[in-house]
Image (cartoon, coloured by chain):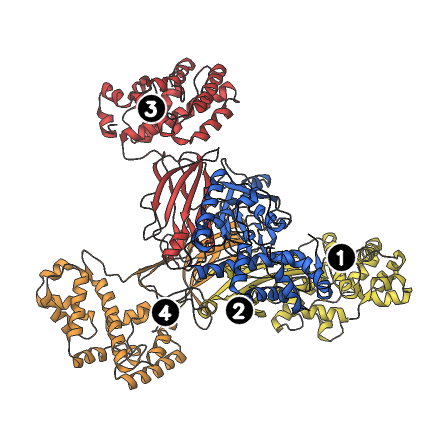
Chain colours: A orange, B yellow, C blue, D red
Amino acid sequence: MERVTLDLLNTANRGAFVAALGAVMEHAPWVAEEAFGARPFSGVASLYQAMIDVVRNASDERQLVLLRGHPELAGQVAREGSLTADSTAEQGSVGLDRLTEEEFATFRRLNDSYRAKFGFPFIVCVRRHGKDSILRQFSRRLENNISAERETALSEIFHIAALRLDQRVDGPDRLNVHGRLSTHVLDTHAGRPAAGVAIEFCEIMANGTSLVLVRAKTDADGRTERPLISRRPIPIATYELRFAVGDYFTERAVRLAGPRFLDVVPVRFAVAEPEGHYHVPLLVTPWAYSTYRGS
Amino acid sequence: MERVTLDLLNTANRGAFVAALGAVMEHAPWVAEEAFGARPFSGVASLYQAMIDVVRNASDERQLVLLRGHPELAGQVAREGSLTADSTAEQGSVGLDRLTEEEFATFRRLNDSYRAKFGFPFIVCVRRHGKDSILRQFSRRLENNISAERETALSEIFHIAALRLDQRVDGPDRLNVHGRLSTHVLDTHAGRPAAGVAIEFCEIMANGTSLVLVRAKTDADGRTERPLISRRPIPIATYELRFAVGDYFTERAVRLAGPRFLDVVPVRFAVAEPEGHYHVPLLVTPWAYSTYRGS
Amino acid sequence: MERVTLDLLNTANRGAFVAALGAVMEHAPWVAEEAFGARPFSGVASLYQAMIDVVRNASDERQLVLLRGHPELAGQVAREGSLTADSTAEQGSVGLDRLTEEEFATFRRLNDSYRAKFGFPFIVCVRRHGKDSILRQFSRRLENNISAERETALSEIFHIAALRLDQRVDGPDRLNVHGRLSTHVLDTHAGRPAAGVAIEFCEIMANGTSLVLVRAKTDADGRTERPLISRRPIPIATYELRFAVGDYFTERAVRLAGPRFLDVVPVRFAVAEPEGHYHVPLLVTPWAYSTYRGS
Amino acid sequence: MERVTLDLLNTANRGAFVAALGAVMEHAPWVAEEAFGARPFSGVASLYQAMIDVVRNASDERQLVLLRGHPELAGQVAREGSLTADSTAEQGSVGLDRLTEEEFATFRRLNDSYRAKFGFPFIVCVRRHGKDSILRQFSRRLENNISAERETALSEIFHIAALRLDQRVDGPDRLNVHGRLSTHVLDTHAGRPAAGVAIEFCEIMANGTSLVLVRAKTDADGRTERPLISRRPIPIATYELRFAVGDYFTERAVRLAGPRFLDVVPVRFAVAEPEGHYHVPLLVTPWAYSTYRGS
C-alpha cells in the first residue's frame, strides 16, 4: 500500500483525497468525501476523528448501508476471492482464509444467525483478535439487543478504520493502534542477563493445540532482537512462551543430574488489551523461576 | 499381600521364613534360605543387607541364574499372563501392560538386542521410572560393557528387593524407598493460603501427550489433602502441575478484564531422585507467579 | 505458677477453686467465686466464657471497681514494687520496668490525662504489644468517648484473663491465645534448604533503634530449631529478620567478587495479629531474593 | 572545567595541547608533552592509551617522581588548601574533606605507615570508592610487596587519568568510566508499574549509620526520573533502597489492618564494579516482594 503524507492530503484536491482514503471505510468512499471539508488536519488523529464524525452524523439509513457494505467473516465472498484488498489482508491475518470445513460451517451458522437477527453482517476488527476470540465475540454479541449491537458494530468499524489510516498516512502523530509484547530472561543464578536461551512463542488454541508464532534466541542483554509482537495490535488470545532453560544452564556448565528439574519452562498468559504493552520476563535458576506482567 | 512382623520372622522356622520372603528375589528362594542363618535381625535394613550379602557372595554362575530368572519387560511372558504376582503388579504400575503395538515392538527389539549382547534379560526397578525413562535407560545401558552391566542389573535387583521387602515386613525401621511429591498454593495478592484452587497433576510423555495422575483442590491451608505422590518411589519422569488460578481469583471477586492474564498456570518439572522429597509450591497473584523446588 | 487440671477444678470446693483462679481478674476474686456456680466446665473455653459472663452481668459500679483495680502501666506502683505477681511479669515482658526517665515521664503524662478523662487507669493486655504499639494505643484511646473506652478496657481485661487462665489450667482444649512466628531459608541457587545461615531476629523501635530478640542458625531443613516466637502472643510491633546470606554462599564456595552484592539481607515487617501464624521465608541466590507472608 | 574537542587537540600546537591535558596526570605535564608526538588520535581511547604508554615507557625514576607527585589522601596538604583543583574535587566527592578528628587520625596513621613502607603516598581513584572501601583498600594494600604495590598505584593513576580525560575531551568515542544504578517498582498486586512510590537511596557505612543520597518518587512507569547514579563511576560501597510501599498501597485503597505487614521495604546491596550497570527493581504486593540484580 502506498503511503501518503498528511501534508499532501491537506493540499490535495478532492479527487486525490478520496483516492487515497476512500477505502478506509469499507465500500463507503462518501465518508472520505465528506471529511474532505474539514481540512486542514493538524494530525492523523484529527483526520481520524473527522471521519468518525461523518459516520456519527450520518442518518440511520446511511449507517445501515455502511454496516451492510462489510463482507461476512470467512464467508462465501472470501471463498470466491471477491473481497476488497483490505479485507483480504485482514481476514488472512488471523487465518480465516485457512479454515477447516468444520470451522467454515461454524462461521456460516453464526453468520446466518447473526444476519437473521440484526440485518447486517457480523463486523469485527479481526487484527485485534485470535480466531478463538473472534468466535467468543460472535457468540456473545448474538445475545445483544439491536441498538447495542449497532453501536458495537460501529466501534469495530472505527477500529478497522484506525488501522487502515495508520497504514496509509504519515503525519506528525501516530494513532494508538499498536501493542507490544516482549520478553526478557534474567539468570538469577549468575546475576546477569541469560544470553542464548532458545524461546518459542506460541498461540494456544481453545482445543489445546498450539501454533508457533516466533522462534528466537536471547541476546547478550537477555532480550530477543525484536519484540515478539510490535507495530500491530496484539491479537486477543492465549499465548505460551517456552524457554529452553535446561539447555542454557547445561551450556553454562551448571552440573545437573538428569533429567533436569527445569528443562523447557512454559509460561502461559492471555492478552486482553490489543494496544497494550505486555512485557513477560523470566527470572530463573536451575531450581526456581518467576514471571510477571511487566511493562 | 500379607504383612509380617520382623519379630515373627526372627522366631519363625526356616520353612515359614522362606514362605514369607522367598519371592523377594525373583525365582530365587535360595536367597531367603541362606539369609535365614543370619538371624536375628535388629531391623528391616539389616535383613535387607543380609539378602544382598547372600547375592554378592554367590558364585558368578548362581548370580547369572538369578539374572536370567527375571522376566523380560513388556515381554511375551507378560502377554501370556505367566509373570509372578510381584512382577505383574510392578510392570502394570508403569503401564507396561497397556502398550500400543508400536511400543510393544520397540520393547521387543530392545529386549532382543539386550539379550543377544548380555545373555540375560534387561532388568530395571520399574516402580522408580516412568515409561520414557525406562526406554532411555534401556538404550543407554545397551552401550555398557558386560561387567558394568551385570553390576547395574544387580543394583536394580536390589532396588526391586527393597520395595518388595518394604511391602512385606513391619519392623522398628523403614527402608528408604519412598519419595514424596507435594505442592502448596500461596495467594500473595491477599497474603494467605489459596484455598479451593483446582489442580491437575500430570505426567508428560516424550511425545508431548499428558496423562492426568491426580485431580485435587487445595484446602484452607493451600495444600492438597494428601501429597500428590507418597508411600512409593516417585517415578523418574517429567510432570506438570496445572493450577486453575484464574477461576480462584474470579471466585474471590478480584475483577479481571477477560481474558484473564493468568488462567491455568502450568508448572513443568522433572524428578531425578525417586526417593527424594519434592515440594513444588506456587506463589501467585493475578499478574505474577513464582515456583521453586522446595523441601 | 502451679498448673491445675480442669478436672480438679470441676471437683474442688469453692475455697480451692477461688484460690486457683482468684487472680485471673486483677484484684477481683469475686469473678472466680461467682463462676464457681457454673461448674462443671467441659473445657477451658467454657470456664473462660463463664468468667466473662460474670463480668458482663455485673453492675456498672462493680465493673468500674474492676477497672479501677488495675495498676497504672509503668506507674508509681510498679516503681515501688507493689504490683501483683501477674502484673509484674506482664509489664516486665514488654520492658515497662526498664524505661528511661523520658519514657517514664511520657507514660506518666498519658496516665494522668487518661485517668482525668475516664476515671480509671489505662488497661491494655501488654503481652500482645510492643512498647511502641502500647504508646500508639494509649494516644489513640484517649480520643475515645467514655462508653467506647469502657468497652475497650473490658475487652483488654478479657485478653489478660485468657492468658492468665492459659498459664494456670490444663484441660482438653486450649484457648486461642498463642501466635507463631517462623522463618525458613531456601537456597534457590542450589535447589535445597539453606543450612547454617546465621539469622538475627530484631524488634525495630519507632526511633529507628533495634533490639535483637533471637540469634539462630538454620538447620539442615533451612529452619530454626524453634519458631522465633511461639507459646505466647506475638507482640504487635515491627520486626526485622537479618539473614547472613553472603557468608552462607561464601562457605559453600560460590565465588563472589567483593564486596558481595548481597551480604546481610534485612526483611522488615510488622505483626498486626498477635494470635496469628506468621511464616516469613527467604528464597535466595547470591543475586536475588524474595520473601512473603506464608502460613 | 572547559571541554575541548579531540579535533582541536589534534590540530593544536604543543603549548595548547599541554595546557589542555597537562593536569590529567598529577603534577606531570611531561606525560601530555610526550603524548603530543603520537597525534593525530582517532578517538579519546587512543589518546588515553598514548598517555598510558608514555608512563609505562618512562624510567623507574621518572615513574617514582610521578607517584610522589600525588597528594596524601585526607592529608595535611588538603587541610591547608594546597591541592590541585582536580584533587580537591576528587577528594571532596567522597567526603575526605569532612572527616572527624578520629577519621583524620586513622588516615594519618595509614598514610604514615604506607609512606614508610613504599616511599610514596597512597594513591587511589577516590571517585570509584566510598569512604569505607578506601579504608579497606588502604589496609589491604599495606600488605603488598613493593613491586606489586607500584603496579597497583600506577593502575589507580590510570583510572584517575581516564576520569580527568573524560571530563575534558569530546571525541567520537567515550571512555568506559561511567556506571549506572537504577531501580524500578512493579506492583504485582495490580499488574502495573507502581507510580508515586517514595524512595530513599542511601549509602550504608561500616558503623551502621546511613547517609541519604537521593530522595525520589516513581513516575507512571515505576521508575525514577533519572538513574540514581549515572554519568560517573558508582562508588564501591554498600547501599540501601527504601521503598515506601505501605503508603503506596494505602493510597491505592488497598485495605490493610494496621500496622501494615510491609511498610518501608529496605533492599540492601553492595556494588563491586564502579563501571557496571546495576538495576535493582522491586516486585511487590502488600504481602510479598522480590528483588534482584537486573541489567
Q: Can you tell which mark lies on residue B196?
A: 2
Disc 2/disc 3 C-alpha distance (Å): 66 Å
The residue tagged 1 is B154
Q: Residues within 10 Å of mark 3 (few under 14, many from 20)?
A: some
Inspect the image, locate mark 1, and give the three-letter code of the amino acid beneath it.
Leu
Is disc 4 in contact with disc 3, using a CB cutoff of under 8 Å?
Answer: no
Q: Can you tell which mark lies on residue D88?
A: 3
Are the residues under marks 1 and 4 on the same chain? no
Inspect the image, locate mark 2, and give the three-letter code of the amino acid beneath it.
Gly
Disc 3/disc 1 C-alpha distance (Å): 78 Å
Disc 4/disc 2 C-alpha distance (Å): 31 Å
Q: Can you tell which mark lies on residue A130?
A: 4
Instruction: Tell me the subunit letter for badge 3.
Output: D
Q: Residues within 10 Å of mark 4 (few under 14, many from 20)?
A: many
Disc 2/disc 1 C-alpha distance (Å): 46 Å
Q: Residues within 10 Å of mark 1 (few under 14, many from 20)?
A: many
Q: How crowded is mark 2: few (under 14 residues within 10 Å), some or many (20 or more)?
A: many
Which image quarter is the C terminus of chain D in?
Answer: top left
